[in-house]
Structures are given as C-alpha cells and as structure tokens.
Image (cartoon, rainbow, N blue to C red):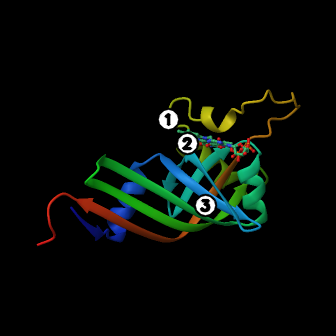
Amino acid sequence: MFVREMTEGECIALVSAGRLARLACSKDNQPYVVPIYYAYAGKCLYAFSMPGRKIEWMRANPHVCVQVDEISTRQQWRSVVMHGRYQELPDTARWHRECLHAWSLLEKHVNWWEPGGLKPAPQAIAGTSPHLFYCVYVDEMTGRAAVAGDAS
Ligand SMILES: Cc1cc2nc3c(=O)[nH]c(=O)nc-3n(C[C@H](O)[C@H](O)[C@H](O)COP(=O)(O)OP(=O)(O)OC[C@H]3O[C@@H](n4cnc5c(N)ncnc54)[C@H](O)[C@@H]3O)c2cc1C
C-alpha cells in the first residue's frame, strides 16, 4: 500500500459526493468531535442542528476542523481534512437567503433533519423550534489517498 496526496479537485469531488463528516471544535483547550451530516457547495459545508454543546462551543470559538472519508478496504481509502470557520445562519433578513440555500441542499435527502433534530432527553415544548442551520467556510483542504500496491 502507498499513500499519496490528493489534488484539490479530487478533494472537492470527494467532499461534494459525501454526506457524513466528523466535526471537531474546541473550547478552553478541550477538543470535541461529533459525526454530522452535511451538504457541500461553494466552499461551504452546510448543516442542521439543535442547540447543544457543539453549537455553544463553535459560537465561542468559530475555528473548526472537519474530516470526510471514503473507506473501501484497509488498503484503499481516501480522506479529506478541512480547516474552516463556523458561521451560524439565523433566519434573519441578513442570512435568510443562505439559510434557505442550506435547507434546499440538505432536504434533498430523506429524513435529513432527523439526526440533528433529535436529543436523548425530551425537549421542552416551545413556541418556536430552536433548530438552526449553519455553515463552515472552508479555508484549507488537504487529502490523502491510500492505494494497494507500491508507488513505483
Ligand atoms: C450518522 C450520524 C449523523 C448525524 N448527523 C447530525 C447532523 O446532521 N446534525 C447534528 O446536529 N447532529 C447529527 N448527529 C448527532 C451528533 O453526532 C450529536 O450527537 C448531536 O448533534 C448532539 O451534539 P451536541 O454537541 O449538541 O450534544 P449535546 O446534546 O449538547 O450533548 C453533549 C454531551 O453528549 C455527548 N454526545 C453528544 N453527541 C454524541 C455522540 N454522537 N456520540 C457520543 N456522545 C455524544 C457529548 O460527549 C457530551 O457529553 C449525527 C450522528 C450520527 C451518528
């Protein structure tokens, strides 16, 4: 097996085709990683969530790292790591279009809202839903691919 760098085009193709990512954020020197579903378009990863730890932490520190992969076998895989910045997309006049854009990309998948909209404990009934959309502006993207065989 050998490992090679992926081109920017290969990285974008992998992230565009993918759906599941690991999102890492940090606060007060403590990292926190969770799996999330996303949609990628125009250098942004769009996602849906309820309020909770990751949203609270990303509000406090918008610098995040996101990883996406495609693992075929132990010897054949591709992995992309992205560094970016969290941007919440509240349904306000300023962010309305981006918020709708996020929704239109995510809703292409059946039950798209389920993992982000559910929590283990029952949620208090409120007049408005606390759910939110956000995006990660991708500043930097690198990829590595493993291929069976040797490099020669
Ligand atoms: C395949 C998949 C897709 C998902 N897609 C989304 C998505 O699109 N949007 C979304 O918001 N969430 C998604 N989730 C759920 C996500 O991983 C988090 O569990 C959820 O967002 C709650 O995170 P929080 O920071 O708000 O946790 P909180 O409800 O604030 O709870 C924080 C506490 O719960 C623990 N915890 C939280 N999440 C997990 C976890 N996944 N595994 C183990 N312990 C956990 C933390 O360690 C911490 O102690 C997905 C999960 C999976 C497995």
Q: Earlier in the sequence, mark 2 or mark 3?
A: 2
What amino acid is labelled 2 in the image? Leu
Residue closest to the eye, 105 or 25: 25
Residue at x 36% of width, y 70% of height: 8
Image position of 118 (left or right of 141) = right
Disc 2 secondary structure class: helix
Image location (x, y in percent) of residue 92: 79, 52
Q: Which residue is mark 3?
A: 136
Q: Which residue is mark 2?
A: 106
Image location (x, y in percent) of residue 63: 66, 68
Q: Are marks 3 and 1 in contact (CB under 8 Å)?
A: no
The N terminus sits in image quarter: bottom left
Answer whether residue 94 is visible to the viewer in this image.
Answer: no
Q: Is residue 29 above or below residue 77?
A: below
The C terminus sits in image quarter: bottom left
| Marks 3/1: CA–CA distance | 20 Å
What amino acid is labelled 3 in the image? Val
Number of labelled discs? 3
Image location (x, y in percent) of residue 89: 71, 54
Q: Which mark is residue 109?
A: 1
Q: Earlier in the sequence, mark 3 or mark 1?
A: 1
